[in-house]
Image: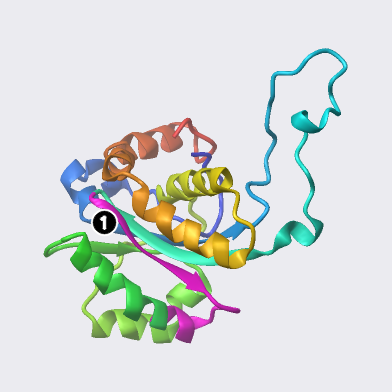
Amino acid sequence: MCSAGGRSGPGLRNTDLNDSEKAWENVLWSDETKIELSGINSTRSVWRERNADYDPKNTLPTVKHRGGNIMFWGCFSAKGTGQLHRIEGLMDEAMYCKILEENLLPSVRTLKMGDGWVFQHDNDPKHTAKATKEWLKKNHIKVMETPSQSPDLNPIENLWRELKLRVVKQQPRNLNDLERICEEEWTKIPPEMCANLVTNYKKHLTSVLANKGFCSKY
């Protein structure tokens, strides 16, 4: 994961490096992401013969207006992926609380988090709004401390990348198709991948600290 300075993401507290691996297993990580119908906007490489740059089999067709996209909220823990929720329209604090109401606690139960689990979300204004804080307090949910202007170290970014790669292979034809495929592929992400991300989290923190907040191999 490439970590850059910003407002979001679990912060670099000194106590993080002293936390046991078991402590990170009790974290429920969450975030939002946008998934485009036209796939991941990145460079791809192919093996080709000389002077065959523009052969149709060596190129990707363009999609006018990018073909549309869907915003999702999702979460995961060391035990696997939680629920994935499609965000309809512009999300405000009221919608965010509704998303948490319908997806957060059900995910905790499905993943069998047990007692002492901690919820992670970043410092997005919707996440830190008064209504959101009141909802979290009402439901007795402990939230991970996130200092301002901290690097984005949320391991769920690795899962979003994995999901987008899986979706590209399925070649969705429309937004309904895209939503269905995203939901199916999210549930197929193996718990072992989630556990590995959490296991390596301490190494991630150490690496970013060593690089003074810049990119790391994690």
Is 95 above or below relative to 127? below
Is residue 23 visible in the rendered image? The answer is yes
Whether residue 92 is in magenta: the answer is yes
Residue 199, given in percent of the width and then of the height, sits at: 27, 38
Going 21% across and 78% down the picture, which residue do you hit? Answer: 140
Location of residue 89 by image quarter? bottom right
Q: Is residue 112 left or right of residue 39?
A: left
Q: Which region of the structure is painted magenta?
A: 79-97
Q: Residue at the far top: name it.
A: 50
Is 98 above or below relative to 165? below
Q: Nearer the viewer, residue 17 or 80?
A: 80
Location of residue 82 by image quarter? bottom left
Q: Nearer the viewer, residue 38 or 76?
A: 38
Is 64 above or below relative to 43? below
Looking at the rendered structure, the secondary structure element under dot 1 is strand
Going 36% across and 47% down the picture, which residue do you hit? Answer: 189
Give, as a three-letter code, the residue at label 1: Val
Residue where numbered disc 1 is placed: 27
Counting other residues with Cα less than 10 Å from the Cα at mark 1, is it few (<14), some (14-19), or many (20 or more)? many
Residue 52, given in percent of the width and then of the height, sits at: 84, 20
Going 44% across and 34% down the picture, which residue do you hit? Answer: 218
Q: Nearer the viewer, residue 118 or 209?
A: 118
Is residue 20 visible in the rendered image? The answer is no
Is 61 above or below relative to 30? above
